[in-house]
Image (cartoon, rainbow, N blue to C red):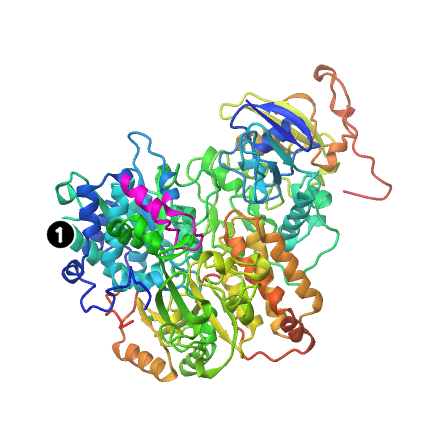
Amino acid sequence: MEIKFSEDTLAVANKIIARYPEGKQKSALIPLLHLAQAEFEGWLSPEAMDYVASLLHIKPIEAYEVASFYSMFNLKPVGKCLIEVCRTSSCWLRGSNEIVEHIEKKLGIKEGETTTDGMFTLKTVECLGSCGTAPMMMIGAQYHENLTYEKVDKVLEQCKTDGSRKTYLDKVVIDKY
Amino acid sequence: MGKKLLLEHDHVPGIQGYEVYRQHGGYQSVEKAVKTMSPEAIVEEVKKSGLRGRGGAGFPTGMKWSFLAKPEGVARYLVCNADESEPGTFKDRYLMSRIPHLLVEGMITSSFALGVNTAFIYIRGEYYYIVRILENAIAEAYANGFLGKNILGSGYNLDLHVQVGAGAYICGEETALLESLEGKRGNPRIKPPFPAIAGLYGCPTVVNNVETIAAVVPIVNQGGDAYAQIGIGKSAGTKLISASGHINKPGVYEIEMGITVEDFIYSDEYCGGIKNGKKLKAVVAGGSSVPILPADKILTLANGEKRLMSYESLSDGGFGGGTMLGSGGFIVMDETTSIVENLFTFARFYHHESCGQCSPCREGTAWMEKILHKIMDGHGTLADIDLLWEIQAKIEGNTICPLGDAAAWPVASAIRHFRSEFEEYVSNPKSVKVVRHYDAMQNA
Amino acid sequence: MAKVTIDGRSIEVPDGTTILQAARMIGPEVAPPTMCYHSKLKTSGGYCRTCLVEVTKGSEKDPRPMPKLVASCRTTVMDGMEVGNQTSPKVIEARKGVVEFLLLNHPLDCPICDQAGECHLQDLSYEHGSSKTRTDFERRTFEKIDIGDKIQLHMTRCILCYRCVKVADQITDGRVHGVLNRGDHSEISTYIEQAVDNDFSGNMIDVCPVGALTDKTFRFKSRVWFTKPVTAHRDCEKCSGKVNLWYKGEEVLRVTGRKDQWGEVEEFICNTCRFDKKNTSDWTLEGPAHISNQSVISANHYEVFKKPTEFKLNDIKPLKIEEGSKS
């Protein structure tokens, strides 16, 4: 796969870059890494990071340093649906451990693993600001809250049927929260 | 019903959009500010209001604003801290997704007061769906002449951008946030200099929390004095409280400061009491960083009076017997809760979120999590409890930024108030069902 | 000018001087230890927290004490400021904690580490640490990697002082290594395997306070205390050419930059001088090098007091070695 933004994405990238004062284009690094991750199979390969660095005229290491710092950037390939289950206090109090167990059983994978069909990767994450609607999980940009086993099953089923890759940049319907 | 200043219209259908927001008095503060007030006069009103930073530290906003350096010919910036990541806190998310124009309006009015022509809203990456909501609101504000060049014919120009983060609690620390906004790792800066002197791109900068910025709107509309009348003592105004845990009605509540903690937990207007009729065991009142308090101490002060929901009352008793209002992340735990396990989730959190720049936090947070894990697994000793105590004491106050303190306080308070529970784990190890141990930082 | 008192001893220093600099001006007895600060590197310091001091009086104007201990390397003095270093029990206690944190994941492999004998972490631990460890958890480890053919990165020993990153940023063009990941998973790395290849890369070795970056041309050649440092210079078009040569017998085992009494490099040198000029004939010898107090060599057993003109290599005597022990 050639690592290069589509014309549309490049236009968005250039619009973002133009926000910042002259000489401060590095500010666009995180937004552009998000774009790259969404466009290039849900993860940031060294080539993808090099490409972003070249757009911003910064050294590749500056992109690696930043990408490896932030937990939303995947430096290894992930499944089409990255399931991120919150595990911090409020979610834990309301049963996030059991939700994780349930998903593990259902998908036949452990936390940190990807299903053999490449559909799902399961990950636990720290507080996503959904404590009032705990337990919760995030897939792409979509928050799934007040989880029950049934709700989890339904969401995973939908993901499977849909089959598309979910990214943080997906346009999502705002939930009723 | 308490007075509502921010969430008065949050249930009005369509309030997310410009038209409905405007019909309900939206953008009046901008009109009033740019047409009838000087920037200095607005800063004065904010000072008079007694508004304190709503992100957690509670620093007087007017004072923070007056520290902003104003050298000739140098750009100044206003950055809104929407990196809400403190466990137990979700009020900014609620406010931004329900009434995005309130934040946009607050940003415009505040920017005018500070003489800022470019402002940013730095929002955590996980809130990507809110980025779209905010961007829609901003586009509407541009279209209606509230943003861009010559706002409402006043000659004042302002551009407002949403900047997205990518998963790092530390970016809620204002200098780490600025580093991140400059496209760097979220490593807090060593202070001084403070952002008011050298912030974004080395220029004078004010960083304020979402709720703080939003509160500027009613302050300008009604005047600082009127705002100061609301609340109690130095805890002026209303506060958004994120209530979660073992309660009947989790959610975001706007309270007038000064109501009792008891009322907040048990009245139907707010949390509606403990779930399943259980007894209250403990509360973390202001987000994961603040000291946890057992039921009797959170409800009642040492002198027997009822504890109130205010900066002063919550911190009454100091660190030994009190806590803090913090970000207003109110986590309630019932009698079945294991304090040790809950502490473990906090310790794991701070370990995961330490930036790794300075040694006490980098090494200490990881160490504390490991020891707690060991205790939970039934391998702990009494000496481990003392060691935990000593480690937190060696972190507190010795780090570059407050994350070290934030990691230390929950440990200190849990041991102080619930030591017997730790000892129970040591002497009578229970089997813990699933412990999710922090492993690789990089996922999957 | 500002008058500052550290551990009861006063000095007048120009405004803008840091507490650490002022303390060093007074003398080693009151100077806080440092691991990450380096006088020749801008924005260095603040990370390791070993130089924390207690400000008991803020200034003449505002005598309130500072609420927390401060990093002396990054805090500027105020007129009338009073500072506690060795005399402050709080500082001693905090420093003990910092040493413990720095050693928590350190492999303590001094017996096989080339840095032993001139390692700042060894000195720090000896002076401020505890002789007992309180952790039985597995230590963090990393694979050794070669970054270029002359430098080895042994990340397991690193204390994340950021000095090598600042060297690459400030005296070379095109930094290719940096700090990756975060928290206690942070590591110095090039991410994709890549050689650090530029004329001044060798200075990363000199600024590394521990044995994380070592000179491969010197690797396992000798314990440093069996070598004899000699100041020397040559005309170099790339750098000052002012170096220390480290002799064992008649052989130059390694070349380093000269360090000041705090163990910090005085002038950075180029890789040609460091790696390619290992014959005595390449150099003009000046005399025995004075090595700072931060080293086992600082006993200076080998040092003889002769003018450079009278100086001969064989005048330098090695440390007295007990019978049977070999390097």
Q: Which residue is mark 1?
A: B143
Of residues A159 and C252, the one drawn nearer to the viewer in this rendering: A159
Q: Chain of mark 1?
A: B
Looking at the image, residue C317 lies above or below residue B105:
above
How crowded pointer 1 is (Cα within 10 Å; few <14, some 14-19, many 20+) is rated as few
Residue at the far right: name it.
Answer: C323
Q: Which residues are magenta?
A: B41-62
- Using residue C42 as the reference point, say whether residue B70 is left or right of it: left
Of residues A144 and A111, the one drawn nearer to the viewer in this rendering: A144
Assign the N terminus of chain B to one quadrant of the image.
Answer: bottom left
x and y, in percent, of residue B291 in the image: 54, 62
Q: Is residue A41 visible?
A: no
Q: Give yes or no for residue B327 being in the magenta stretch.
A: no
x and y, in percent, of residue B15 in the image: 20, 64
- Using residue C85 as the reference point, say whether residue B332 is left or right of it: left
Quadrant of the image occupied by residue C24: top right
Assign the C terminus of chain B to one quadrant of the image.
Answer: bottom left
Question: Which residue is rendered at x = 14% and y = 45% of the image?
Answer: B152
Question: Which residue is rendered at x = 28% and y = 63% of the image?
Answer: B7
x and y, in percent, of residue C39 in the image: 56, 32
Q: Give yes or no for residue B52 being in the magenta stretch.
A: yes
Instruction: Say what amino acid the circle numbered 1 marks.
Output: Ala
Quadrant of the image occupied by residue A112: bottom left
x and y, in percent, of residue C11 in the image: 63, 24
Q: Is residue C181 visible?
A: yes
